[in-house]
Amino acid sequence: MIEREQYQPSPAYGAQIRRNEGDKWTLILTRDLRHSPEKVWEALTDPAHLREWAPFEVDGSMGEVGTVNLTWAGTPQAIATRVTRADAPKVLEYGDARWELEPLGSGTRLTLWHNIDRRYIAMGAAGWHISLDVLDRLLSGTPIGRIVGLEAMKSGGWQRLLVEYSKQFRLETPGLPPTVPKP
């Protein structure tokens, strides 16, 4: 895929953090997409679409309240995850995540609220940034395939985003896992 080889993420943007209790924080990422809320909703809830862009896979639809087995990229064990709210095409909540879809002209303002340990905020922001780029390309009809887990972490784009988000959030840049080459 030539498109994939040429892909470079945009600079860090559209993110903020909020402190919760203890070491848990909420990472908030907002992205304006050129696609309808209905089209974005399908990509957020359909297992086949999720396999194309998300950092996890599920064994059933996330479009209705219930339990699915969710497997994060790079982990062998599925986690029973409860979809607690599925208000199509406006709000999707499951586990530590909440997605809000707001009509924006003919497109959608997509906001992810992800509760995350403070040590992983910049890493999470970098990973979700790339996943949302891949989602946008998928919905535009120019898919490049998902870029997640260790594959994402090895890319210069992810490492650049890690530094940018660390600075933006005034966090110390976390050490990279030993299997990831330093930039």
Image: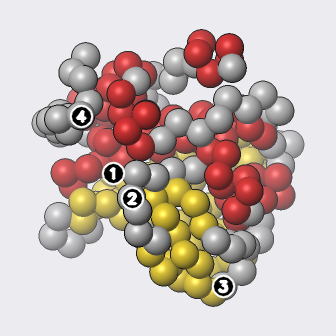
**Would you say 145 lies left or right of 159 here?**
right
Question: Label 2 is placed on what type of residue?
Answer: Thr
**Marks 1/4: CA–CA distance:** 28 Å
The residue carrying mark 3 is 65
First-in-chain label (3 vs 1): 1
The residue carrying mark 2 is 75
Q: Nearer the viewer, residue 32 or 84?
A: 84
Q: Nearer the viewer, residue 12 or 142?
A: 142
Q: Please count the marks in the image.
A: 4
Residue 14 shows in the view: no
Question: Label 4 is placed on what type of residue?
Answer: Thr
Neighbour tally class for label 1: few under 14, some 14-19, many 20 plus, Cα within 10 Å: many
Neighbour tally class for label 3: few under 14, some 14-19, many 20 plus, Cα within 10 Å: some
The residue carrying mark 1 is 17
**Marks 3/1: CA–CA distance:** 27 Å
Quadrant position of residue 60:
bottom right
Question: Label 1 is placed on what type of residue?
Answer: Ile
Label 1: which secondary element: strand
First-in-chain label (2 vs 1): 1
Position in image of residue 124 (x %, y %): 36, 47
> Which-is-in-front pick, marks 3 and 1?
3
**Marks 3/4: CA–CA distance:** 38 Å
**Would you say 102 lies left or right of 74 here?**
right
